[in-house]
Each structure stands twice: as C-alpha cells, then as structure tokens.
Image (cartoon, rainbow, N blue to C red):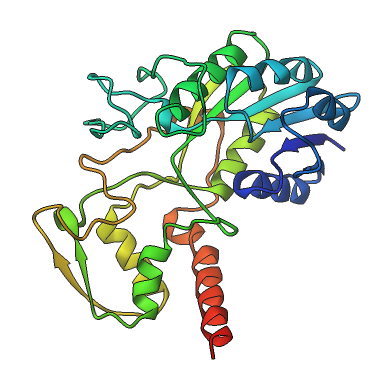
Amino acid sequence: MPRALVLGGTGLIGGATARRLRQAGWTVDAPGREVDREDPGAIARALGDGADLLVDCLCYTAAHARTLLPLARNASSTVMISAKAVYADDLGRHVNSDEPPRFESPVTEDQPTLAPENSDPFTREGYGPNKVAAERTLLDSGLPITVLRPSKVHGPGNKRPLEAYFVDRVLAGEREIALACRGEGADHPSAAANIAALVETAALRPGTRVLNAADPDAPNGLEISRIIARSLGHEWREVLLDHDESGRHPWHRIPPFVLDTSAALALGYEPVGDYAATVQETLRDLVSSRSWQDRSRE
C-alpha cells in the first residue's frame, strides 16, 4: 500500500488531496498544526523512513524549499503547491501589481515569471517572488519534484469562498445583478478536487516539471453568476454594464487570466469535473452556513 505525507493536509488543497489518495487506497498522513512547517526536525519525523509521495502545501519561500529537499530525497515523488501569482506579462505586471497583467492568450508554463526574492512571503508584493524562489530551489535540485500552479482555488472548506459574492445576493432575494464589463471578466478557477487529481497523476508519474493546475473550463463572471443562480433555483435580471466602475465580482479580470492546462492533460491528468460540477458542494455548504447564521440570530 503506497504512503503519502501531505504537509498542510488539513487545508483546502491538502484536505482534498488526502481524501482522494485515501479513496485510491493510499495510506496518508496529513498533519495539521501538530507539525510545525518551520521546524525541519518535526517534518523529518513526520516523514519517517520515507514515502511514495510527499506533498507540500505550505512551501512559500526558498528557505522552506531547502528544508524540503532532504525529505524529497526519501520520496519517490514530491509535489509542491505554488501559484499563478508567479507569472508576469511582457511589462512585468502580475496578479498582485498595482496595474493588472494583460495576457492575450492562455498562459503556458513557459510564460516568464517574476524575479525571485527573499522577503516577507505573506505580503502582496512578496508572495509571488518568494514562490518563484521556492520553485527554483526545488527544480534546480534535479529531484523528481512537480510544481503545481493553481489559479483561484475553490472547494468545500474554503475559509473565504468567492462564490459567497453571488450566493449572498441570491439568498437576499435580489432580482437583478449588475456585472462590470458585461460580465466578460474571467479568472481561471481551480477546484481543490481537480488539483488533487493532478497531484495523484504526478505521484504515479514522477518527474521534474511545472504544471498549471486549473479546471477544464474558465467561465467568465456572467457564466458563473448563471451557474450559481441556476444551481440555487434563482432567477434575476442581468444588468450588463459597459464599464467596470461598478458591478465588479471576484473573477473580474480584463483581459481574462486563463491557464493553459495541456501539459497536465498530456501527462494523463483527468479532471474530476468542470466548474459547474465541482462548485456544487461549496454552494451547499454556503447555503447551509448562511441558514444556520440566520437561525442563530432569531
């Protein structure tokens, strides 16, 4: 029976990965706060004598990556969760810059990235550059390490679900929805379940590589508003604005930011489902939590 260690295994991506691997017959250790990511000794003890798969959902800096390398040498395959925040357009703009990036076509793994930095990774400016530094430290080792770059991650258990933007309006009974730029803005979603499927694919096909990790479709704001309203049995009039001064939603990016996932598909990755299918559990959780909150106020 293959064994996996998932660092950050109680989080959104780590939890989905642990569930998928267990369903596939793996033995999975998915420690949460009981293993300090800043303590190399604690991580080494969690790994023990080795594993078939090592997944790090908590690798944010080059220092984190360096502590991961000794463990990766005792794993058949290692997966590090990075982010699309590493990508920069021709003018150096990125998702966290003051001016948004402009990608005129789906972004491949060959798209230039930001320059690596050793700074605070938990700031808007430092997040992407530190992820780049972590990626390069791991990939330069030559070990069988797969770096995954997801986009807007969604799934049950998300502490800040973007879908709440539309769900709350549905539950409030709003009969019209205003959408900036006619709802054409899009920011590729990545279901945690789909990321988990790609993690398993990488585990079964060890290698040194970078893969975009996203849903098989990239619906725009208008399409997402319709998916959510339809899923909740709601109807509203769409007010499609020509400007972006109002009606902005969490997926509003013009031009759209879409990831090319052909490399993952070529490796054998099979998505669990598209956005409409994979978002359903999140919608059920949101409706349930909102209903509980309403009852608690009575």
* Residue 192, visible in the rendered structure: yes
Q: Considering only vertical position in the picture, is 277 above or below 121?
A: below
Q: Considering only vertical position in the picture, is 282 above or below 142?
A: below
Quadrant (top left, top right, bottom left, bottom right) of the C terminus: bottom right
Quadrant (top left, top right, bottom left, bottom right) of the N terminus: top right
Where residue 280 appears, as percent x and y from the top left, is 50, 65
Q: Considering only vertical position in the picture, is 204 above or below 141?
A: below
Q: Furthest-left residue in view? A: 242
Query: Which image quadrant is residue 203 in?
Result: top right
Q: Furthest-bottom residue in view? A: 298
* Residue 207, visible in the rendered structure: no
Q: Decide which of 211, 99 is in the foreground and name it.
A: 99
Where residue 33 appears, as percent x and y from the top left, is 75, 44
Give the residue drawn at x 48%, y 60%.
279
196 sits to left or right of 160: right
Give the residue drawn at x 56%, y 48%.
192
Give the residue drawn at x 57%, y 19%.
134
Q: Decide which of 223, 46 is in the foreground and name it.
A: 46
298 sits to left or right of 21: left
Where residue 46 appears, as percent x and y from the top left, is 85, 32
Q: Furthest-right residue in view? A: 49
Query: Which image quadrant is residue 196 in?
Result: top right
Q: Decide which of 38, 78 is in the foreground and name it.
A: 38
Where residue 269 appears, as percent x and y from the top left, is 55, 37
Give the residue drawn at x 24%, y 56%.
248
